[in-house]
Image: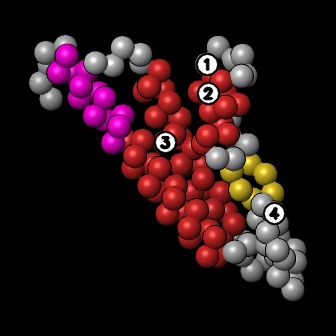
Amino acid sequence: MISDLNLLQIYGAMARHAAEAQSVSAGNIARANEPGFKASEIESFQAFLARAATSGSPDPMATSFKVNLANLPSAPNGNTVSLEQEIFNSAEALGQHNLALTVYSKSIDLLRTALGKRQ
């Protein structure tokens, strides 16, 4: 039985992280041909959880995600976007989002069952 509803907050944050990761990748891909553009990357979800745990915030899962410049080699025009890396990042974010939604929805189903309510 789920006795700690923080689990739902964590998986909600995981879904938000995946959406933000998709947004960062989309922005990088949109500017892949722009000379001098430096690609961005979002912190890992594990790094976010570690930072949120030590933030002292009343709602640590509401902490925003850090987006930094990616440390990638530059093309001759100075652009650092790697389309292959962005495709990988997008696929990873999709898997993370699907995992978060599955666990979240199954947890809700479990709570409904425990309360004796049908779907």
Give the number of the mark in front: 4 or 3.
4
Specify which label sits upstream in the sequence, 4 or 3. 3
Q: Is residue 71 magenta?
A: no
| Amino acid type, mark 3 | Ala
Specify which label sits upstream in the sequence, 1 or 4. 1
Residue holding disc 3: 15
For residue 118, above or below residue 97: above
How far, Cα to Cα, is label 2 from label 4?
27 Å
Question: In what element is the residue under mark 1?
Answer: loop
Decide: few, some or many residues near mark 2? Use Cα within 10 Å; few <14, some 14-19, many ≥20. some
| Picture residue at 31% right of the left edge, 35% below the top | 105
How far, Cα to Cα, is label 4 from label 3?
25 Å
Q: Is residue 110 magenta?
A: yes
Magenta stretch? 102-114
The figure's colour scheme reads secondary structure
Specify which label sits upstream in the sequence, 1 or 3. 3
How far, Cα to Cα, is label 1 from label 3?
16 Å
Question: In what element is the residue under mark 2?
Answer: helix
How far, Cα to Cα, is label 1 from label 4?
31 Å
Residue 45: give x, y in percent of width and height. 60, 42
